[in-house]
Image (cartoon, rainbow, N blue to C red):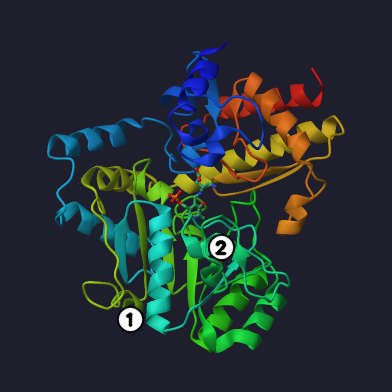
Amino acid sequence: MTRNEILFSRAQASIPGGVNSPVRAFRSVGGTPRFFTRGAGAYVWDADGVRYIDYVGSWGPLILGHAEPDTVAAVQEAAARGLSFGAPTEAEIELAELLKERVPSLELVRLVSSGTEAVMSAIRLARGFTGRDLIIKFEGCYHGHADSLLVKAGSGLLTFGNPSSAGVPAELAKHTLALDYNDSEGLAEAFDKHGDQIACVIVEPIAGNMNLVLPRPEFLRTMRELCTKHGAVLIFDEVMTGFRVGPASAQGLYGIAPDLSTFGKVVGGGLPLGAFGGRRDIMEKIAPLGPVYQAGTLSGNPLSVAAGLVTLKKIAAPGFFEALAAKTRALVEGLRQAAQKHGVTFSAQSVGGMFGIYFAAECPASFAEVMACDKEAFNRFFHAMLARGIYLAPSAYEAGFVSAAHTEADIAATVAAAEAVFAGR
Ligand code: KE4
C-alpha cells in the first residue's frame, strides 16, 4: 500500500469518509485522495513524496501560491502577538477599508470565518431587511452548506424547491426557488409570479461550482433590473470569483453593483476568513445596530486578517491580473490545441485566474449542458494527469485555478502532459 492509501484507510476510522470536506474524498473521480505534506509556490507534495503542479490551490484561496513567504511571515508575526482576542483590532478596520476601496458597492462590510457563514448571514439579512421569506438561487450554483441553499429545483422550474440534502426541512426548502442559470426569461417569470414575496436573488456572477460557466450578458443585467423593480436584494456570491477574476471581482468585470456581496477564499489568503457587505441601509440592520442577529467567536481573526491583508495588497500590484489572466489563457489554449491535434472532443475557457475544461465540443452555458459533458472522459483524464504530476480538481464539476507562482514552464509542462494523454502515450 502507498502512504496515501495507508493514511486514507486510517482517516476513515475517525473522520466521515476520511475527509473534512466531501469533494476531497475523490468519490467523483474514484481512487485514493492524495494526503499533502507540503506546498510551495505552484507545487504540492503528497505523503509518498510525489510532487504535483497544483491547479486547485485549496479551491481558490492561494492566488499567490502555497506558503507565499510574505504571507507566512505576516501570519507568524501576528501569531506571536496573540492568536485571537474576541475583541476589535485595528487590522480588521484596515481590511474592511481595503475591501471597501477595492469593491465600491461595499459601504459596510463584516468579517466572518468562511464563505458559508458569509452567505448564510447575507441571506438572513436580506430576509430581515425586506421582511420577505422567498429566495431565488440557480441550479448548479453552490453557496456553501447553509440549509436554505441546499435546495434543488422543484418539480416544475417555477415551483418551490426540494431539499438537496437530508436534514433540510421541506418547510424551509419551500422558501427557495431554484431556477436555471442564464435563463433570463425564467427569472422574469418568477418575478411576475412571486415578485413582492422575493427577499433576494443570490447568484455566482460567474459560476464555478458546476465547472466554469459564464453569464450571458443580459442575465446579470436582467437580474439587477428585476431586483430593483421589485425591491428584492441582489446578492453576488463572490466567494470564488472575488479577487480571482479581476481586481474588483466579477462585479467590477461586468459593471453591475449588487446590493450585497459575499467573499471568502482569496480574501483570507488561505486562512479561515469570509466577508459580507454592501448597501449601508441594508447592512445597518445587522446586530448590534439592527434586528438581524449575526456573530462569531473567531470573526476577524488576527491571523486570517494578516494573511488577507498581505494577499489583497500583493494582488493590487500593477499588471498582476493581466499576467495571471494571460498565463491562464495560455493553459487553456494549450490544452485546446493538444486535444484538437489528437481529435479529442474537448473545450476549455478561462476568466482571470480561473478556468474550466470540458469533454464536450463547446463550453457549456447552462447546468444541463454541463451535465451533458463526458464525465467519464474527464475522470480518465484526471487520473492520467495525476499520474504525470498534475493535480486538477478531483471532479468534472469544479473550476481550476492558476496562481501567480505558476511559471510558463509549469504551464508548458502541463500542456505537454495533456498532449501525451490525448495521444494515448
Ligand atoms: P466555504 O464555506 O467552503 O468557505 O465557502 C462556501 C462557498 C460559497 N460560495 C461559493 C461560490 C463557493 O464556491 C463556496 C465553496 N466552494 C467550494 C469549491 N467548489 C469549496 C470546496 C469544498 O467544499 O471543500
Q: Residues within 10 Å of mark 1 (few under 14, many from 20)?
A: few
Q: Which mark is residue 205?
A: 2
> The residue under label 2 is which amino acid type?
Pro
Mark 2 and mark 1: span between their CA atoms?
23 Å
Quarter occupied by residue 117? bottom left
Instruction: Return the x and y of residue 94 as percentages of the image width and height.
Output: 22, 56
Quick check: 45 left or right of 89? right
Tally of numbered tags: 2
Question: Which residue is nearer to you in this view: 16 or 32?
Answer: 16
Q: The C terminus appears in which quarter of the rendering?
A: top right
Pick out the residue farthest to the right.
343
> The residue under label 1 is which amino acid type?
Asp
Could you tell me which residue is drawn at 60 percent across and 85 percent down? 194
Q: Residue under label 1, please give it.
A: 281
Is 224 situated above or below 138? below
Quick check: 163 left or right of 180? left
Quarter occupied by residue 347? top right
